[in-house]
Image (cartoon, grey):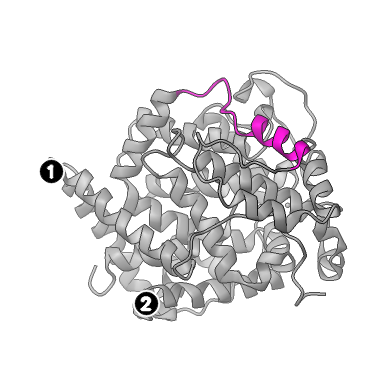
Amino acid sequence: MGSISRRQLLKAGGAMGALGVVGAAAPTWAWSATQSVAGLGGQTPPWEVWDPEADPVVAAVIERGETARVNALLRGWTRNGQALPAGLPADLHAFLEQARRLPEWTDTRKLAAAVAFNERRGTYLGVSYGFVSGMMSTVIPHEARAVYSSKGGADMKRRISRTAKFGYDIGARNAFRPDGSMVVTAVKTRLAHAGVRHLLPRSAHWSATADERIPISQRDVLVTWHSLPTSVMRAMKAWGVRISGAEADAFLHSWQVAAHLLGVRDEYIPATWAAANAQAPQILDPVLAPTPEGIELARILVNLAAEVDGGALSRPLLQSMTRHFLGDRIADWLQLPRNPALDGGLAASWPAFVGLKEAGLLLPGSDHLSWAFDEVLRLGALWYLGDGQELHIEIPDRNNPNRD
């Protein structure tokens, strides 16, 4: 790939991919519950549903002035099988005990197979989470506006580091096992979403630009969900990555479980890739559009990603990567300049890189070596984004003070 190394792609992707886990327009909803993991359920459109279990509990924590104390206690809860910290408010403790349970339809064999898939496809996942999902989040209007006006928008490096943790934890070998962290990360993200729902309607900037009364509906979470596994699978297939049906189903299942833990109703979670590919054109594709907030967030993301490798990645290169992986329309929306030399180089080098890597995966043991290398780079990106500190996803206590 010439001057564009696999290491550079991964490290930049870690920063770029971190924006997405919130979500759009006058929608339509044609969805059979039989297409969902629930296999039954009502037909309430997801834009009319938020999180009736988490929202009142988190609102009460904020209104009682307990946010700082609760966040401090929850910093000690890091592993899926770990007991909840002593001293939590009773209502929050009861909610967390319920929310941390894996759904009854969880298939542990598929989760194990997803680990193997993540090991073999770590490079593609790093790039696609970054330059497909991450930058796509800036053209999801609800998400861009919510990030821009909420507390996370005041410190984008901190915001990105917390969301990067979600992508890292779901791809870890022990993601959903008792010694892993994905359950904790998803449930804490659910708490953070509930905090934003309570606080953001008080933001003057958000209220002046939003086309919704309450942010982060179930539809918004689904929009972001499709910007991740659905868009990633679309990208890998377009690149010519060989993925078996069993591998694809395992990857999907890990994200189905994650959606449940984020509070998405089972009746909305696609049961199969066919269902996901039927839902995405309703949920994700129609909402993509530029906003002033998204354009600014894209600029911030490019600047941060350029710093991840000590400045080794130039802004023009990152802009060309975004244009290559998301296309001219979105790159033009985000006002990313064209660079004919870099744009052409990527168009030629990425297919060649994928072809060589696919051939290399046929060598015995190469998938494990690839995973080990990618793991070091992912941890390095998290360390940088977190300024060397342990990363914690927390309930917000205010909106972005720079936007009101």
Q: Quadrant of the C terminus?
A: bottom right
Q: Secondary structure at mark 2?
A: loop
Whether residue 181 appears in this view of the structure is: yes
Secondary-structure class at tag 1:
loop
Q: Which residue is mark 1?
A: 363
Which quarter of the figure is the N terminus placed in?
A: bottom left
Label 1 crowd (10 A; few <14 / some 14-19 / many >=20): few
Give the residue displayed 30% in from the left and 40% down from the top. 242
At 67% across and 41% down in the image, what residue appears?
A: 282
Q: Is residue 286 above or below residue 296?
A: above
Labelled pair 2, 1 in contact (Cβ < 8 Å): no
Residue sitting nearer the eye, 128 or 61 = 61
Looking at numbered disc 2 in the image, what kind of residue is underneath it? Leu
- The amino acid type, in three-letter code, at marker 1 is Leu
150 sits to left or right of 338? right
Question: Can residue 326 be seen by looking at this rendering?
Answer: no
The percent position of residue 165, horizontal first and vertical second, equals 49, 54
Which of the 4 image quarters holds residue 289? bottom right
Magenta-colored stretch includes residue 167:
no
Residue furthest left as drawn: 364
Left/right placement of residue 293 relative to residue 339 reads: right
* Dot 2 or dot 1, earlier in sequence: 2
Residue 35 found in image quarter: top right
Residue found at x 74% / y 55%: 67
Q: Which residues are magenta?
A: 89-107
Q: Residue 296: image x %, image y %? A: 64, 75
Residue 25: image tag: none
- How far from the left and from the top, in percent, is residue 130? 46, 60
Task: Identify the residue at image location x=61%, y=64%.
Answer: 138
x%, y% of residue 383? Answer: 42, 65
Up-down relation of residue 137 to residue 234 (above or below)? below
The residue at which mark 2 appears reads as 313
